[in-house]
Amino acid sequence: MRENNNESSSLEEIPIQTNNLTIHHPDTIGYINPEMNEQVPTINRFESIIENQLKIEIYNTARMVKFFSMIDMGFIIVQLAASIYLNNIRWVVFLFFPLCYCGYHGAKNYNKSNIIGYCVYLSIMTVLYLAIVLAYFNFFYLILFFIEIYILNFTAKLVRLMSTVT
């Protein structure tokens, strides 16, 4: 009978305090080995949760910037082909292709300086679309202007998020 009492006393709750978290059965949870008298590591769970949320937000924003830069590269290639076929000067826009590729590469590898290069491209295109809207009063270019502003804000958000991490 006494052997049963000794075994039941070893499974009793042993409260352990760790940063406002009480662990009642450390041997069943697996955090602390009761035979080794190790210190309970201090973990600030809120900081790790915030850090994980920031990483998720950076990952999602980088995916969208990568998608936007791929679309921009596709439009530049189509515009190059059309300008060669029509034999006009619009092929000059192809000179911005490396900046779009910088946006894709920077979003893929989380390189802030490459993403800033893509922001420069977006700024140039935004100013260009605004100049076309003011000169020709074209509604299509006005829509493109607002789309470019949205993409520029989204890309600048990624740069801000990446600067908070490093």
Image (cartoon, rainbow, N blue to C red):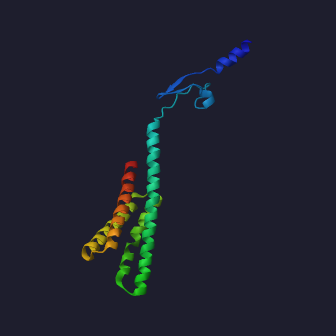
Residue 104's image quarter? bottom left
Residue 96's image quarter? bottom left
Q: Residue visible at 43% across and 86% down?
A: 85
**Residue lying at the far left of the rendered structure:** 135
Where residue 117 appears, x then y in whole percent? Answer: 36, 64
Q: Is residue 104 visible?
A: no
**Residue lying at the far front of the rendered structure:** 139
- Compared with residue 27, is residue 48 higher up or lower down, i.e. above or below? below
Q: Is residue 80 visible?
A: yes
- Compared with residue 44, is residue 93 higher up or lower down, i.e. above or below? below
Work out which quarter of the rendered image holds the N terminus and state it.
top right
Where residue 41 appears, x then y in whole percent? Answer: 51, 31
**Residue lying at the far right of the rendered structure:** 1
Q: Residue visible at 44% across and 77% down?
A: 78
Number of marks = 0
- Compared with residue 165, is residue 20 higher up or lower down, i.e. above or below? above
Q: Residue visible at 39% across and 68% down?
A: 99
- Compared with residue 139, is residue 67 higher up or lower down, i.e. above or below? above
Where residue 161 appears, x then y in whole percent? Answer: 39, 52
Where residue 105 appears, x then y in whole percent? Answer: 45, 63
**Residue lying at the far top of the rendered structure:** 2
In screen coordinates, is 89 left or right of 15? left
In screen coordinates, is 8 left or right of 59? right
